[in-house]
Amino acid sequence: MARVTPFIRDELLPPRRPPRRHLLSIADLARGDVERLLALSRQFARSLDRDVKKLPALRGRTVVNLFYEASTRTSSSFELAAKRLSADVMSIKSVGSSVDKGESLKDTALTLAAYDPDVIVVRHPEIGAPNLVAQHTAAHIVNAGDGQHQHPTQALLDLYTIEEELGGVAGIRVAIVGDVLHSRVARSNIQAFLLMGAHVTLVGPPTLIPRGIERMGCEVAHDIGAIAAADVVYVLRMQRERMREGESYVPSLREYSARWGVTAARLRPGQKVMHPGPMNRGVEIDAAAADAADALIERQVRSGLVVRMAVLYDLLTYDPAEVHVATRQEVA
Amino acid sequence: MLFGTDGAGDDLLVRRARVLDPVGCVDAVLDVRVDGGTITMLGERLGANGHRVLDGEGLVLAPAFVDPHVHLRTPGREDEEDLASGTKAAAAGGYCAILAMPNTEPVVDSAAVLGALVERARAEAEVPVGFFAAITKGQEGGELTEMVELAEAGAAGFTDDGRPVVAPGIMRRALQYNAVAGRRIALHCEEPTLSRGGQVHEGAVSAELGFGGYPSIAESLMVSRDLQIAGYEGQQIHLLHLSAKESVEAFRAARERGVRATAEVTPHHLCLTDDAVRTLDPNVKMNPPLRAEEDRRALVEALCDGTISAIATDHAPHARHEKEAPFEAAPFGVTGLETAFAALYTMLVEPGLVPLEVLLERLSDGPARLFGLEPPRIAIGAAANLVLLDLGAVWRVDEAGFRSKSANSWLLDETLRGRVRATVAAGRLAFAA
């Protein structure tokens, strides 16, 4: 376990650690990493059943939440996750900060770096923003959503939710429905589900499915009927704030809803429904489907807390080198 | 048409270099003597006569390079580059002449602005510079500039580079009128409603990463259109920075039909594909974007067979703080003058994809001919425009080593082979290392 040792002379410190780890993209994770994080999440879930839900694991560590975009679920989830692990938490929203005065992301990162945070959780409307923060600070960086690119902790909590509900992800058929083109959740999830052995089909209008996305290993269908074969129907919100004006991705929300809306009538009993939130009830999903017993949406939010606890804990304590040493000792 | 500081030509002796002038059919180890800026002798064991001697042992002496597509950011963004730094960078890259693009602040769309630039070039330019003027006022695509006056004031050609000429009617009018202006029109082909929001090539990489896509047809559609209009008006056009295989196909087909057109390609489009943007590094963000391997191969093939006759760097300096931003927020463009030869030598010549002679020709003779410049030649009586190349040199591209004011290079920290040791531009030694 890595420890903070401020009072030991440089030459007495153990040899240089490998470069610090981040969670920037599902593409950077191997199956073993995901399994380790899900196992940790289950451990933390058990702690939620106790009266005193706080754990001392990250006491003395500092976690900064740097959010340049609106968020309810993710920001509250990260804040509570850090606090449950006894870390000190600082939450900075771009609105109301010096970003309003035109301060660049680089300068914001440098300012935060002065406080020596252990982890910076970054949500930003532009792809690669967390990578930039990683370049200019010494902290571990967690990508809480960068533009249309990745939202890795969402994918992890979705995997966790499916595992808890269905016992496993391998072999499960998932249909991801809606605005895949603008969705970072979709990109992270496609990679995460495929990594863990699920089968993924994207369903939506041709204007909202990225051209060439099949190369990631998933299938594409344009008829809502394609969700019939799925064990899990994963519904995406129409990302209107990311759509450029005048681009006419769909002629109207009315037509979108009619053709691709996930309604209770289009689902069969036993099919699980998921949504990363926030939902636009009546657009991509109807109230009946959202509130049904087979909807896992609330469970996703709960999963979010323990998965983010696992991510923070893992970033600050897991040392791949130690694992190798342990294995060698066992063999000897 | 080219402007630079005045001065007497130099007296030089380049000793025992492999003199390689592919177009002039020279390939031999020779001494080359330059008197007052003119090549006067080619032979063996020439006397130095008090001339400055450049040791060419083990090196290649070739006709110096010409870059028909450079952004010097002057007037308006002299923090990014000015005439002095831009021409210093050109000299370090082996260039004896460069042509500057007019998308400055203000745009070069009047004889007054052009005249001021010419004056600055006469005061500062270390290597002769030519200046494009805009096709339309402010490059807005609305009204034509006073093309005849601009031509008379010394414009090297006309382009709205940085932007396309959107309206076919205006494109036609410009070509029609250009018959009396007598300079070549160079075109940045981009259909804006197709490229809108596009950050990188629309393909498997953009699908996976989530970037807005800039499809190949955004370029090839305009290429086809412009070739048709040029054919209809019987006017010659030059296509800037081709990036897509569909553009190459349309270009070939038009030439077969008899349309008079030329095309250029950049070093980065010859060497990189859209896989490079996986690093999310804004130093691989360009317009047009890096495309797929099949596009790159089509460009290399067209360069080899001469369909594309010129390499142009599209040297696009940007302020550090503007490029130190997330990819989507960063401006398009990379520098290239100081690394063009080494990058192409390392990535195309050494692996055997393009012969050295072809590369040298496409860097020098081809670009010079595009806009009516005298192609550099190593021959008795020719003005000395020479580049001394060390093909065996291995060097790391370092920000600190750039003579350009900007360091937004796609080659930062890369190790390259092939280095410019000296450049003689218009008879004067502009660079020696």
Image (spheres, rainbow, N blue to C red):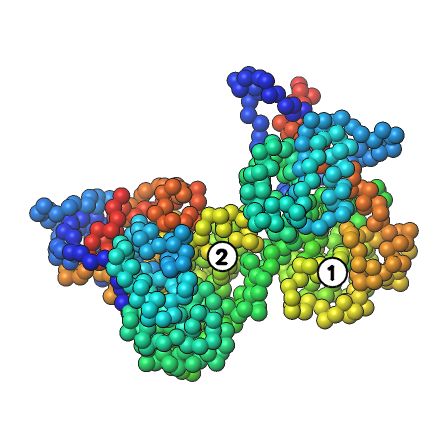
Where does the image place residue A262, in percent across and percent down from the top left?
A: 83, 61
Locate the N terminus of chain A by quadrant: top right
Instruction: Name the spot of residue B43 as percent of width and height, x first.
Output: 13, 52
Residue drawn at the location 57% of the way across and 50% of the way down? A102
Q: Is residue B246 visible in this depiction of the protein?
A: no
Query: Residue at left 37%, top 81%?
Result: B177
Residue B10 shows in the view: yes
Identify the element where label 1 is drawn: loop
The residue located at (55%, 43%) in the rendering is A106
Q: Residue at x 78, y 53 (%)?
A: A278
Where, quadrant-wise, is the C terminus of chain A in this rendering? top right
Q: Nearer the viewer, residue B137 or B275?
A: B137
Residue under label 2, please give it.
Answer: B332
Pointer 1 residue: A238
Residue A267 placed where, x, y %?
87, 59
| Frontmost residue, B143 versus B263 | B143
- From this view, report whether residue B255 is shown above or below residue A6: below
Residue A275 position, x and y percent, is 79, 52
Chain where mark 1 sits: A
- Pinpoint the chain carrying mark 2: B
- Residue B299 placement, left or right of B63: right
- Seen in the picture, residue A119 relative to A129 is either above or below; the reply is above
Please, what is the three-letter code of the amino acid marked with disc 2?
A: Phe
Q: Quadrant of residue B362?
A: bottom left
> Residue B48: which numbered mark, if any?
none
